[in-house]
Amino acid sequence: MDEVFKALADASRRRLLDSLNARNGQSLRELCAGLDMARQSVSKHLAVLESANLVTPVWRGREKLHYLNAAPINAISERWISRYHRERVHVLADLKRALEEELMSDLEFVYTNYINTTPERLWQALTDPTFTRRYWGVVFESDWRVGSTMVWEVGSVRIADHAQVVLEADPYRRLSYTWHTVTPEFAAAHDTGDGLVARMAAEPRSKVTFEIEPLGATVRLTVTHDGFEPGSAIREGIQHGWPELLSSLKSLLETGEPLPSPDPATQPA
């Protein structure tokens, strides 16, 4: 946490976070132009933010894009806010919301977390129903081979569709699959209105990718959910659900217990 506080203490770095909050996924060139800062200065500040896990770099071909990451702020919030009067920490709470509430014009969601586990156990937690049922409330039926279909069981709802498939499967390193179909049964179980259901069902199918990178005794997990159109209702729905779900996954792997079950409506399902 010391690195996070150090990173946030500098006004220029806070300006960089503000810029990414206004428009996520910017290149170094775009950040320099938008903030009227020298390239070398921006590079140094970004290195500090990346080291503190406040910014996640994602390569698109030869271009390196930068995304806000709310995981460290979530960790600080969970550890400290309950110990002090909330009025004393309203700035921290505001920053937490700012990092999570990215503009809906963003076409993808990127989130990074560090977990004290092994790549093998994290892979198991992403694919084995014994794990997914505990922190997600979802059971997947699949052989986890590229091109294979996936059946989603969310509570009492079973979602089967030939377009729900595994896109990439490199055990212990990378997993990617298409998002599930928004069925009437799923919508009813989540008390979703007919109008919103129609919007979600009409959207192009998005996909989620998990990148697993071992770092000593920890594993860096980067989740990218993309394929959205501007104004996507699904994008709006998953932006708060993913941080909660991944925090619960981290808790399960590190303590043996997931976080208390949140409102199912906020989960990325």
Image: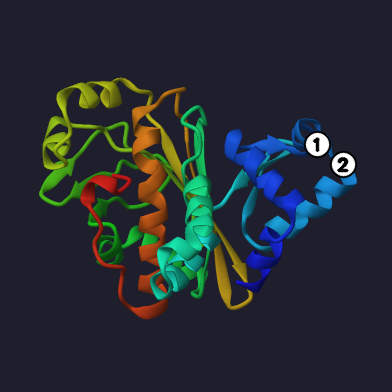
Q: Earlier in the sequence, mark 1 or mark 2?
A: 1
Q: Amino acid at mark 1?
A: Cys
In the image, residue 229 sits, relative to residue 97, either above or below, namely: above
Q: Position of residue 200 (x, y in %)?
A: 29, 26
* Image position of 251 with respect to 181: above or below: below
Residue 56's x, y, as percent? 63, 51
**Amino acid on which the number 2 mark rests in the picture:** Arg
Residue at the image point whose x is 74% and y is 59% from the top: 48
Relative to residue 264, is residue 268 drawn left or right?
Answer: right
The reply to whether dot 1 and dot 2 touch (C-beta < 8 Å) is yes
Disc marking residue 214: none
Mark number for residue 39?
2
Mark 2 is surrounded, within 10 Å at the Cα level, by few (under 14), some (14 to 19) or many (20 or more) other residues, namely some
What is the secondary structure assignment of the residue under circle 2?
helix
Q: Quadrant of the C terminus?
A: top left
Q: Position of residue 14 (x, y in %)?
A: 68, 50
